[in-house]
Image (tube, rainbow, N blue to C red):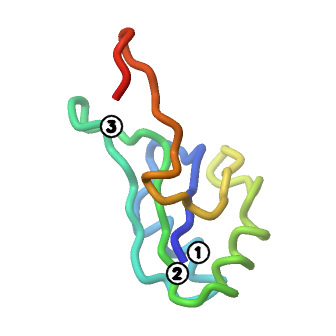
Amino acid sequence: MNIYVGNLPYSTTEDELKNLFAQYGEVVSTVIIFDRYTGRSKGFGFVEMAVQREGETAIAELDGYLFNGRNLRVNMARPRDERPRRRRNDDWY
C-alpha cells in the first residue's frame, strides 16, 4: 500500500519517516520529495507498507498527528494519472 504523507517538517529524514510508520507494520520503502533546483525538501513524501491493513491503521492513527511541530496529512496515495493537472505560468503540464 502506498501512502502520501504531507506537511512534513523540512528537516525530516527518510529514516525518521520509516521509524514513525514502522510502529504500525512492515515498511517497504520511504521517499521524501526534494526540489530539484534547491535540494530542499518539499514537505511531503511517500511510504510503502507491505500489508494493506497495517497501512490503513497507520493512516487512521497518523493523519493529524503532531510530528516535530507539524500536524501530518496522511492518506492513501493516488496513482499519478488520477491527479489533477496543475497550471504553471499560463501553460498546462
For the C terminus, give its image quadrant.
top left
> Residue farthest to the left?
37
Q: Amino acid at mark 2?
A: Met
Circle 1: residue type? Phe
> Residue 40, which numbered label?
3
For label 1, count other residues whose C-alpha is less than 10 Å away and answer few (under 14), some (14-19) or many (20+): many
What percent of the width, then of the height, locates residue 48? 48, 75
Q: Residue at x 58, y 90 (%)?
A: 51
Along the polypeptide, which appears first: circle 1 or circle 3?
1
Q: Could you tell me how far apart the alpha carbons at marks 1 and 3 are, in whole angstroms?
A: 22 Å
Residues marked 3 and 2 touching at CB (< 8 Å):
no
Q: Which residue has dot 2 on it?
A: 49
- Element type at mark 3: loop
Mark 3 or mark 2, which is nearer to you?
2
Identify which residue is drawn at 71% across, 77% down.
56
Q: Which tag, 2 or 1, sits closer to the chain's start?
A: 1
The image's mark for residue 21 is 1
Q: Quadrant of residue 22?
A: bottom right
- The N terminus sits in image quarter: bottom right
| Residue at the top extreme of this rendering | 90
Mark 2: few/some/many CA within 10 Å (<14, 14-19, 20+): many
Q: Find out whether the residues at labels 2 and 1 contact each other: C-beta distance under 8 Å.
A: yes
